[in-house]
Amino acid sequence: MANEKTLVSARAAPNHSVGPVAWLRGNLFNGPISSVFTLLAIWALIAGLTPVFEWAFINADWLGETREACDSGGACWVFINARFEQFIYGFYPDELHWRVNLTFALLAGLLAWLAIPRLPAKRWAAVLTLIVFPVVAFVLLHGGIFGLQLVPTYKWGGLMLTLVLAVVGIVGALPIGIMLALGRRSKMPIIKSVCVIFIEFWRGVPLITVLFMASVMLPLFVPTEVNLDKLVRALIGITLFQSAYIAEVVRGGLQAIPRGQSEAAAALGLGYWKRTGLIVLPQALKMMIPGIVNTFIALFKDTSLVLIIGLFDLLAIVQASLADPDWLGYAIEGYVFAALVFWIFCFSMSRYSQHLERKLHTGH
Amino acid sequence: MSTQQAKLDDGAPMIEMRGVNKWYGDFHVLRDIDFTVKKGERIVICGPSGSGKSTLIRCINHLEEHQQGEIVVGGTPLTQDIKRIEQIRRRVGMVFQHFNLFPHLTVLENCSLALVWVQKRPRREAEATAMKYLERVRIADQAKKYPGQLSGGQQQRVAIARSLCMHPEVMLFDEPTSALDPEMIKEVLDVMIELAEEGMTMLCVTHEMGFAKTVADRVIFMDQGQIIEENAPEPFFNNPQSERTQLFLSQILGH
Ligand SMILES: Nc1ncnc2c1ncn2[C@@H]1O[C@H](COP(=O)(O)OP(=O)(O)OP(=O)(O)O)[C@@H](O)[C@H]1O
Ligand SMILES: [Mg+2]
């Protein structure tokens, strides 16, 4: 050990050491022009961010109940505080918030089970998440049976509604998307063309149009006695829209599996569905997860469009409370809060997806 | 267990091809293929690259579809009917050039999968059967590993065991050693020779002429989608009739 140390220190110092000073010199100050630009950029950053920082933190008001508490001239976070429950739960009755909390705690637990590699029995976790959880979640959120008080969907809102839209969208779209992708690869011309037309139709239409159609046109197709809930209509529209995107992600995953896999399974006597379910999809799914997470991020942000058909997701409810005469003039605080919540969710998912991609690249 | 499989006598035809033709678009890959493999026979198919050897044996279990002619496997004519195709596939084992093991399953699961899902055996029984065949190909100690952790020769032996688990009446081999490093070829050929000695009906596409001389009852030479020559190994190698066979043999034996 001691020998090695003397050997190392006896060497000439390398030119490219990697200390912070060397890094600065190498990347930011390597020449007069570079140095000038670096200084300019630093000045611009400070000049631009200082007022924002002062507004958001130094001159901001955090505590209080009413707008009278906001007198420092900075951001009025009191507004967010006062309306926080509504932003999260919409008009869901206060005393029943535990049902929402429990639902999303269950979801978080299941997702953690699925995402943490060390935990066993992933198959059961997937079954619970995709089949059992939706039923439990519906019973908990909607109520009306097992002695749970009924909470009609028009009372749902805020972050809770945003999550419901996004999660139902993805969970519903996954099986449909897988079917569409398999259909698109089918050798049967009718099945193939139906799937291609379906996918290309939904991918060519903006979500906002889909939502309009879902709220205006869908009722025309169902008998008048069936009064389709507005939320259900939006969910159907979002799910079908999303399934077209999932289908393309799945198709990419399926294409990455060599043909020999399916042939070897066929040669053993496994039929189409067993080949697909046991051999092709499990391998493809692994590769599809980053793509699915990315589609999910896009959907999560797009759910805010439901405000145009009168559903109060997080953004819509923030916007609605801006019109409250008690809190006029605090639009920036509201939008910053909504943006921050969206950003936290999307950023964590995006990091997770990048982490998965890196893991896939290095081979499991 | 197997009710539909009438046990065939030695010498009864296991595979019959009559006037089989196949095209890829305009390209005529198989031309008037006529031949019969009797039960217990070991047949080697050789021929230049692109001559249609793979296509020929892949038609037998309908991985490729032929357009003309008749293929009968163990008395069952091959038709479009998917049930019948699957029935035939259960009786025919196949080993591929690139092994095609399932990378997401362990060696043991690779072998027991079809027993569980096709033959509906209980998992324990299926695994016991799988272990039996893994022992036969001398790889039982690797049963818990994934295919990616094995050498090419080991993978190919697992692939052979995976096929054998289904108790096939005939085994098809498509160049089973040509993706292997030279030092691994022998371990795979040894397994195949043992199989031949136990009386398995075999149809092998291979350029291992030593193997052909040791175990084959007949050697078939194909070129441009046709069977050019068909003979017992001794006359085939020592006294080839057609010019193309002579040329081919001089090329592969010359090196
Ligand atoms: N799916 C396909 N579509 C079109 N042509 C094909 C297809 N598969 C094979 N072919 C062509 O058919 C011919 C026969 O192919 P095949 O794989 O049967 O040859 P082979 O004798 O097994 O050759 P090799 O020794 O290289 O494996 C080749 O010319 C090949 O290019
Ligand atoms: Mg070939």
Image (spheres, rainbow, N blue to C red):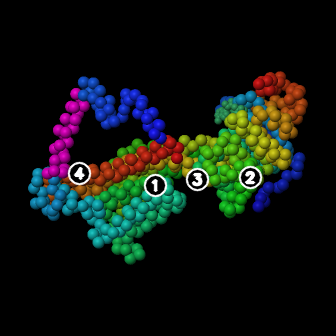
For image coordinates 86% across by 30% down, the residue present is B236
Q: Nearer the viewer, residue A149 or B28?
A: A149
Q: CA distance from mark 2 to mark 1?
A: 37 Å
Q: Chain of mark 4?
A: A
Q: Is residue A246 magenta?
A: no
- Disc 2 packing (10 Å; few <14; some 14–19; many ≥20): some
Return the x and y of residue A96 as percentages of the image width and height.
31, 70
Return the x and y of residue A358 as percentages of the image width and height.
46, 43
Secondary structure beneath label 2: helix
Residue designated by label 3: A277
Secondary structure beneath label 3: helix
- Disc 3 packing (10 Å; few <14; some 14–19; many ≥20): few
Mark 4 CB near ligand 1 (8 Å cut): no
- Highlighted range, magenta: A36-59
Residue designated by label 2: B135
Residue designated by label 1: A115
Could you tell me the amino acid type at mark 3? Gly
Could you tell me the amino acid type at mark 4? Tyr
Mark 3 and mark 4 lie on one chain; the one further toward the N terminus is: 3
Q: CA distance from mark 3 to mark 4?
A: 45 Å
Pointers 2 and 1 in contact (CB under 8 A)? no
For image coordinates 20% across by 35% down, the residue present is A44
Residue designated by label 4: A335
Mark 4 and mark 1 lie on one chain; the one further toward the N terminus is: 1
